[in-house]
Amino acid sequence: MIRRLLAALALVAAPAAAQETPAPPASVVVAFDRETIRPLIVEGLASKETGRKLEANDPVRIASISKLIMALTALRLADEGKVDLDRDVSDYLGWKVRSPYFPDVPVTLGQLMSHRAALSGTADYIIPLGESLEAKFADPASWREGVRPGGRNDPLRRPDPLEFLYSNLGAPLVATVLEAASGERYDRLVERLVFAPLGVKACLNWIGCDADMAARAVTLYRDTGEVAKDGPADLPPACTIPVAEGQACDLDAYVPGTNASIFSPQGGVRIGMMDLAKIGQAILFKDGYWPASADNVLNDVTERGETKGQEFFCHYWMGVQYINRFPGRCKDGLFDRTDVPETDAVGHSGEAYGLQSGLWLLAGGETGLVYFTTQVPPPAGGEDTGGFTDREKALMARASMVPFDK
């Protein structure tokens, strides 16, 4: 399949060296099937300051695809019997997590990972080292007034229009619960349960990435050209975690289960696209890696994940997004192909600091794509509002010159 795809793309996926100056925005697209991982498009500079050309597996901050990796971590920890996705997270943390508007309704990992815990979509989600996660969730501003965690109390689980709201604030709480349940720091937990079993080299906020990876970091630039993230000043040995004023940038004394926000679980994974494709392969083909507790997640995102009233996140469940299925009522079209009747996909999108990214398992269940592109103008509503841009659609059009069939 991929050999035929590559042949069709030979003229459009020209090496970066053949591009005219100025270099295009840094972009990578990688396709995978069961046996093969191959780059389709690699262009631009990893760093304008040094002029270093981008390579297919250079590590980049993948933004909200990190939430899918967080969900995999939670599901594999559930397989170990250390967490229950439907249990009150307060039981793990040792302090009450409650919406002040529904003080008797428990909050669960499943609700948090599905963005149905009634958390605010606008509250600041960065809690620096030295500040209190408990205090953050005691603040009424962290919650949506009048919205019940988990939606209405409906045993039939019919979608509630008010139930879903995409919120980055849930990820620090999920990661902290996983720490409390396991006794392991979140970055080490992800390494043990996701990265290491797949032979993937990746890290969160550069913690655990070696000097070679940091030297190959992709600098993120805004559309206006200035550095947005991971420029030389942001890399080790500089402090790479958020730290409260007067607090030392030192993880040695950090107690797991207190504030995993410092690892940026909502968006802080650094990984190359070749390695990210290995994670896509594991999800798509299972092959002994896919958590037993996740057997129904890909079905649930279509059956239980309807959000109603959302234009971009029309279907979302347990860290998985479903796109391109209902073009009449959803504005989530990434693969706008009139010649291919089924172009729906599951995975996760990412957007932050001028970057847009995606990991998508394509219709038919035999191929997938991962990608990122940089220097993308922010949408009208600002970063983290979702929505595919013309840049992303054009990139996908270049990478899908032939149907993704067998």
Image: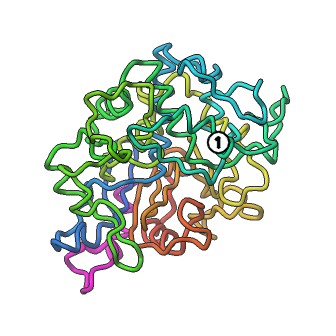
Q: Is residue 345 left or right of residue 254?
A: right
Measured as percent of width and height from the top left, residue 186 is found at 38, 31
Q: Who is closer to the viewer here, 265 or 321?
A: 265
Task: Please report the residue visible at 24 percent of the width from the left and 38 percent of the height from the top.
Answer: 208
Residue found at the far top of this picture: 81
Task: Please report the residue visible at 25 percent of the width from the left and 41 percent of the height from the top.
Answer: 201
Residue 257 in view: yes
Question: Residue 24 lies in magenta, yes or no?
Answer: yes
Judge the density around disc 1: few (<14), some (14-19), many (≥20) Cα neighbours within 10 Å: many
Helix, strand or loop at disc 1? loop
The residue to which callout 1 is attached is: 115
The residues colored magenta run 1-26
Q: Is residue 287 above or below residue 270?
A: above
Residue 197 in view: no
Task: Please report the residue visible at 27 percent of the width from the left and 46 percent of the height from the top.
Answer: 206
Measured as percent of width and height from the top left, residue 132 is found at 48, 35
Q: Is residue 387 left or right of residue 253?
A: right
Residue found at the far bottom of this picture: 21
Specify the amino acid type for callout 1.
His
Question: Where is residue 22, by image quadrant?
Answer: bottom left
Question: Where is residue 344, by image quadrant?
Answer: bottom right
Task: Please report the residue visible at 73 percent of the width from the left and 37 percent of the height from the top.
Answer: 304
Measured as percent of width and height from the top left, residue 21 is found at 24, 86
